[in-house]
Image (cartoon, rainbow, N blue to C red):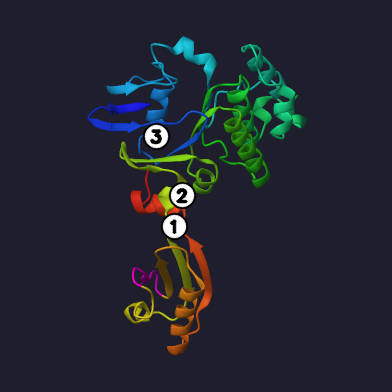
Amino acid sequence: MVTGLVKRYGGAAAVDGLTLAAERAKITSLLGPNGAGKTTTIEICEGYRRPDEGTVRVLGLDPVRDARALRPRVGVMLQSGGLPQAVPAGEYLRVMASFYAHPLDPAALLDQLGLAGSVQVPCRRLSGGQQQRLSLAAAVIGRPELVFLDEPTAGLDPQARHATWELIAELRTAGVSVILTTHFMEEAERLADGVVIVDHGRLVAEGTPAELTGSDGQLRFRAEPGLSTDSLLSVLPDGTTAKESPAGHYVIEAPGRVDPQLLAAVTGWCAEQGVLARDLSVESRTLEDVFLELTGRELRS
């Protein structure tokens, strides 16, 4: 639970009055563009930084004052770094397991993450994706009650990504709370029970993926530029919107799922105009659509 969190660097607030909560035994995805305050918030929750204002409770405890009590109960996966470069992967994970009373089986975990053939390989010789998976294994080896995962599938190939997703889902099934930060919107939409979107250190949206994306459907097609969207709207149900963006690309948004009647109305209108609708597709609003609408499309440094 984070309440009224403020963290300043110099005169700028990296986190500006942020309040959010993550449910136990659920996957909560914290999303935001670069510089939104995600990393600072997570580092405060992990006890690495102190807040300037507000309160933070992790498993009911203060992450700084109660760090010793929290450490065995919380797993942390960093996006990069932290691995002993000269130590073989299997030995590293066995050593990590020795710090806990009831760890997972290191060999089984390495096998699940596709690292069984790299047991004797020094960490420095692992590929970037293999190092990511080893860092994930180290974060969960102690059977934590809560685990922080920072970009867990960055740089992974599709097979490794799906194996990682399966492990994260298994953690939830086992009653583990997961805080996931990612720039991969499909990952958040696929895994998360709850999504929190922050920007400029403030909360801009929260809810389940379904709540955030809504039920609106989209029908898209390509045709010659400059068609009258007002004319098109005249044959469509009330509440429907139509726009051309970019030129020659038309998007119809309906309040509810796109049904056969709407599809027939659009194609019938195109026929009346003597227009061939190309690449016609029916889509749902995605979490990425919502994210870009809320945080903008400009690049962030």
Q: Position of residue 25 (x, y in %)?
A: 52, 29
Rendered view: 155 above or below 91: below
> Which labelled disc corresponds to residue 215?
1
Instruction: Determine the residue positioned at 66% across, 19% down.
Output: 92
Rendered view: 217 above or below 162: below
> Which labelled disc corresponds to residue 38?
3
Q: Amino acid at mark 3?
A: Lys
> Would you say 64 lies left or right of 193 here?
left
Q: Nearer the viewer, mark 1 or mark 3?
A: 1
Quarter location, residue 126: top right
> Would you say 26 lies left or right of 132 here?
left
> Which labelled disc corresponds to residue 142?
none
Q: Amino acid at mark 2?
A: Ala
Q: Position of residue 139 (x, y in %)?
A: 58, 24
Q: Which residue is mark 2?
A: 210
Q: Nearer the viewer, mark 2 or mark 3?
A: 2
Quarter location, residue 63: top left
Q: Amino acid at mark 1?
A: Ser
Could you say which is closer to the camera, residue 247 or residue 147? 147
Determine whether the residue tagged by mark 3 lies in a helix, strand or loop: helix
Earlier in the chain: of badge 1 and badge 3, it is 3
> Would you say 133 lies left or right of 196 here?
right
Tell me which segment is drawn in magenta: 238-247
Could you say which is closer to the camera, residue 77 or residue 193? 193
Determine whether the residue tagged by mark 2 lies in a helix, strand or loop: helix
Could you say which is closer to the camera, residue 285 or residue 79? 285
Determine whether the residue tagged by mark 1 lies in a helix, strand or loop: loop
Q: Position of residue 257 (x, y in %)?
A: 47, 64
In magenta segment, residue 246: yes
Query: Seen from this angle, which residue lies furthest left?
Result: 11
Report whether residue 271 is seen: yes
Q: CA distance from mark 2 to mark 3?
A: 22 Å
